[in-house]
Amino acid sequence: MKIEKGDNVSFTYIKNVEKGLVNGVLVSDYAKNSECYSGEVVEIRDIEHHGLSKETLRYGNIKGDRSKLLITVEDEDGFSKAFYDGRMMNLSVVKPDAIAS
């Protein structure tokens, strides 16, 4: 389902994937640092059409890979946070008209 501005979403966000070697095999733990989030989508930014700032590109502490879409979600306390859509797992989307019903 396509995410749109105004949708209510909940998801698990994958960040800071832990990698290591076990008996010579590279292993990854995607769940260890993942967190659950929910709220209303307030902005969707396509970085192909609205590029990242030079400051953002120089930022060296990203906790995972970037995706084409940057989704800003506002939680119930009014706090906004941006997420790359490619790391949003177990995504549940509720359209605003479904809430009003």
Image: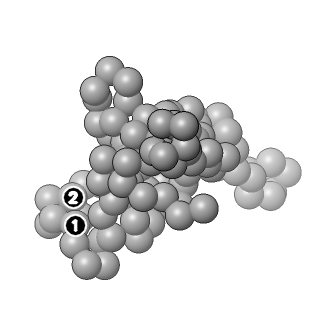
- The amino acid beneath tag 2 is Thr
Q: Which residue appears farthest toward the right when viewing the image?
A: 23
* Position in image of residue 5 (x %, y %): 36, 54
Q: Which residue appears farthest toward the front when viewing the image?
A: 101
Horizontal relation, residue 56 to residue 91: left or right: left
Query: What residue is shown with label 1?
Result: 52
Please name whichever residue, 38 or 22, is drawn nearer the observer in this view of the structure: 38
Which residue lies at the image location 33% right of the left edge and 59% below the top edge?
44
Horizontal relation, residue 76 to residue 11: left or right: left
Query: What residue is shown with label 2?
Result: 56
Horizontal relation, residue 14 to residue 56: left or right: right
Q: Which residue appears farthest toward the left when viewing the image?
A: 54
Q: Residues within 10 Å of mark 2 (few under 14, many from 20)?
A: few
Q: Is residue 14 visible?
A: no
Q: Is residue 93 visible?
A: yes
Which residue lies at the image location 33% right of the left edge and 70% below the top edge?
46
As helix, strand or loop, the secondary structure at mark 1 comes to loop
Query: Which quadrant does the N terminus fall into?
Result: bottom right
Query: Relative to 64, is 13 above or below?
Result: above
- Could you tell me if the residues under marks 2 and 1 are in contact, i.e. CB atoms within 8 Å? yes
As helix, strand or loop, the secondary structure at mark 2 comes to helix
* Position in image of residue 66 (x %, y %): 42, 63
Residue 53, quarter of picture: bottom left
